[in-house]
Each structure stands twice: as structure tokens, then as C-alpha cells.
Amino acid sequence: MIALKSPNLNSSIAGVTIQNLVFSYPQQPPTLSNISFTINSGERVALLGRTGAGKSTLMENLMGLKQPQSGEIWIQGIRLESATISQVRRLVGFSFQNPDDQLFMPTILEDVTFGPLNYGMSIADARDRAFQLLADFGLTDYIHRSAHELSSGQKRLAALAAILALEPTILILDEPTNGLDPWWRRYLAQVLSQLPIAVLLIASHDLNWIGKTTQRALVLAAGKIQVDRSTQELLEDSLTLENYGLPRD
């Protein structure tokens, strides 16, 4: 089992709430237009949509990496704003599409200890946590190697370990299977199924994999959430998938 504190998984508690969110880039029409939805604690949710639909933009708004023009974002009861952004970022772990964007230290052991040390954890405790996570991910033999010496799958897991070292209660993954072969996709799905986190939100084009890792699916198109259904129901609805440019083949 991955070494994290178990969050409150009471499904009546909202992990993420977005209300009337509007975001646009300069001199562009809105990428996100009056988006509202809630993800309750205990839910594992897919965020689907064609390339360019705004999935990454929405996720970056949730982390405070981008600022909306209007609307509200609440993370476990805390409104995301300039005064609370540090507090929110302690609750949310965010994985970029490219793990190289998150692995920048000389070794992956240093990558995984970087965050906890930055937040004041002792060197001994940070290393203990890092060793446990890297062992859970089968990376013990690589702790003193740099990310450049790892396979794509190993990089993905090392980046995830670096995120989980901060013990987030909400995990957001942007295209986590990019560049992974079938074995690594299956292994990553197994890892995610064991994580004791309150909310998992995954943006992906890998529909078969999403069917194994989430229970609810949101489809983003034309700046709005157009579909909110169970993942399995959506994956069995080929017409809706085709309508939103999400064919399974």
C-alpha cells in the first residue's frame, strides 16, 4: 500500500467545487465558459475532450497556475484565491503531461525529498518517506539515478512519487499514459487504484485505460461540460463519443 495518510472519504464532502468558471487567453474567446461541477470525496473522475478543448487549462485553474476572469474554485471547503493558494497547493498534487517538467534534481531520491524538505520536514523523515514511495513503485534500484536514465514509465512513477511525498488529498493527472507501453499503463492503473486519496481527476485520451481507473466521466467541449455520466455508460455510447471526437479506435 502506498504510504499516505488516509483522507476523509465521506462522499458527502465536496473535494472540488467549480462555480461559473470563465477563463480566456488574451484576445481570444473564452476557453472555459461558465463551467460548474462538483467532485465529492471518494470519486475518481475522467476529464475527456478533444485536443485543444481546454482540459489542461481547466486543471491549471484548479491549481492556481492560471487565474480565471470570473467564477469560484473551492478545494475541500477552501476558496482558491491569492490568500489561500499556498494552502490549496498543499492539498492538491498535480502531474504535468511531461514528467521531465517535474524531475529536475540530480537524482530521483532528491526529486522526491525536494518538496517535503521545502515544507520543513527533517532530512531523515523526508528520506524515509521517499524510500518508502520509491520502493512501492519498484524504483529502489534507481534512487541514485537521474530521471534521464529512466524509462518513460519509470519517469512517470518517479514524478508521481515526488507529488505523493507531499501527501496531497486530491490528485490531478494530465495525460498520465502519454508515452507508456501497455505494461506500464497497466501498472500505473494498479498503483492509482491503491492510493488513499480523496479525489482523483484524470485528463486522458486513453479511453480504454480511463475505463479501468475512473467511475465518472466529464466531457469538455465548446468551453463547457457537455456530458457528466458514469465512465462505463459513456464508453458504451459510441454515438456520444463520436459526437465529441472521442472514438474508441
Image: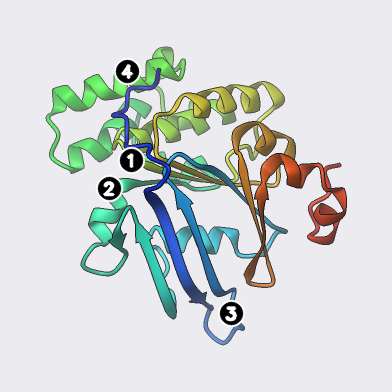
Left or right of 201: which side holds 41?
A: left
Q: Position of residue 19 (x, y in %)?
A: 45, 70
State the separation of the CA atoms marked 1 and 2. Answer: 6 Å
Which residue: 30% across, 52% down?
A: 89
Could you tell me which secondary element the residue under label 4 belongs to? helix
Q: Check disc 4: other Cα within 10 Å, few if <14, some if 14-19, many if 20+.
A: some
Which mark is first along the chain, 3 or 2?
Answer: 3
Q: Are marks 1 and 2 in contact (CB under 8 Å)?
A: yes
Q: Is residue 158 visible?
A: yes
State the separation of the CA atoms marked 2 and 3. Answer: 29 Å
Q: Badge 2 is on which residue?
A: 90
State the separation of the CA atoms marked 3 and 4. Answer: 43 Å
Which residue: 66% across, 45% down?
A: 230
Which residue: 68% across, 43% down?
A: 231
Q: Identity of the amino acid at label 4?
A: Gln
Q: Nearer the viewer, residue 197 or 31?
A: 197
Q: Badge 4 is on which residue?
A: 132
Q: Position of residue 208 (x, y in %)?
A: 74, 35
Q: Badge 3 is on which residue?
A: 30
**Colour setup of the view:** rainbow
Which mark is first along the chain, 4 or 3?
Answer: 3
Q: Identity of the amino acid at label 1?
A: Pro
Report the number of discs: 4
Q: Is residue 151 visible?
A: no
Q: Badge 1 is on which residue?
A: 168
**Residue 89, numbered label:** none
Could you tell me which secondary element the residue under label 2 belongs to? helix
Q: Quadrant of residue 152?
A: top right
Could you tell me which secondary element the residue under label 3 belongs to? loop
